[in-house]
Amino acid sequence: MAIGWYPGHMAKALRELETVMRKTDVVIEVVDARLPVSSANPVLTELRGPRPRVVLMNKSDLADGAVTRQWVRYLERVAGVSALPVDARESQLARKLVKLCRALNPHEDRVCRALIVGIPNVGKSTLINTLAGRSVAAVSNKPAVTRETQYVDLKNGVHVWDSPGMLWPNLKDQQGAHRLAATGAVGEKAFDVTEIALFIVEYMVVAYPKLLMARYKLASCEGSSLSLLEAIGRHRACFSRKGVVDLERTAHLVTQDLRTGKLGHVSLEAPPETELSADAPPVEAVDELSPGPSEPEAG
Ligand code: G4P
């Protein structure tokens, strides 16, 4: 991984988060719209305690819109939490978010202090910069409170911390870890890129076969993931020597295509028991986004 999330790093991030959380009224949890469960970390539920939260499903420009809509309905209905699909680079989002934070602020008589929190690479710094209308947070993987943090006044009664709260990715579930690696949320060094590309191909065959065939001009999705990856390599002329497909180079190409949206709008997780546009397999665990102590039970 680019960042080594060893127990020491986690403990440090936890301490920093606990410190800023004490001064926070509303928690803005940023998840990746393509994998809202795997890109969340259940430790946040405990950390935020009774504070209200909003879930921002970021990078929704890369996700399958139909699946994202299912997630919003699911989160609002089952988890009882406000969820907004967003593109953190879009300036119009500030007004909506300010309105939502103000509505959730438990202290009507004072400014709402909001903390943006999420795993690395999910778009927290981009969001802060968009909200501030200028560059205040470095778009990189720096844990919170590495320097003196201050609030950025968003006007209209909302302040956000100028450094985001960093959570570590939850890698305990292997499927989730593969999804995180596929989107680039965990560094290349933590995974074998060929294994991740095979995972992507296997998933695409089930959930989005037409997108896969269209991108790489495949006649069908039949055969093993390995044979499909080789076919992709041949199509894109990724050869190590004459006639031999360079699997690693092909794997980089496939993962890049997924990450940049060249494979199309792809969601890697769908809410349980929902009718999906593209028979995407549902996720098994949704505990990470389950209702917190302050939120209503499913209605
Ligand atoms: P972080 O603070 O949570 O670690 O994430 P950060 O804002 O640094 O964003 C990580 C990468 O995700 C950046 O790309 C950023 O531009 C991109 N990004 C953030 N929000 C969105 C979004 O809504 N949609 C899309 N498509 N991309 C988003 P990068 O390539 O690492 O940096 P850059 O070259 O774009 O600056």
Image (tube, grey):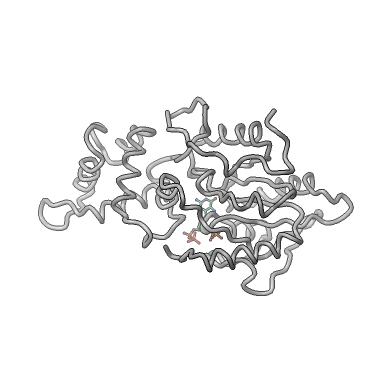
For the point 40% across and 50% down, which residue is it? Answer: 182
- Residue 83 position, x and y percent, is 64, 41
The quarter of the picture where residue 287 lies is top right
- Residue 189 position, x and y percent, is 36, 62
- Residue 278 position, x and y percent, is 43, 29
Of residues 63 and 188, the one nearer the viewer is 188
Give the side of residue 111 with respect to residue 289, left or right. Answer: right
> Dividing the image into 4 quarters, which one contains the N terminus?
bottom left
Q: Residue furthest bottom?
A: 147
Q: Residue furthest top?
A: 275
| 135 w.r.t. 48: above or below | below
Q: Residue furthest right?
A: 109
| 179 w.r.t. 279: above or below | below
For the point 20% across and 51% down, which residue is it? Answer: 237
- The number of discs equals 0
- Residue 121 position, x and y percent, is 51, 57
Of residues 51 and 76, the one nearer the viewer is 51
> Dividing the image into 4 quarters, which one contains the C terminus?
top right
Give the side of residue 65 with respect to residue 195, left or right. Answer: right
Of residues 281 and 284, the one nearer the viewer is 284
Give the side of residue 32 with respect to residue 95, left or right. Answer: left
For the point 73% across and 56% down, which residue is it? Answer: 114
For the point 65% across and 31% down, which residue is it? Answer: 77
| 236 w.r.t. 79: above or below | below
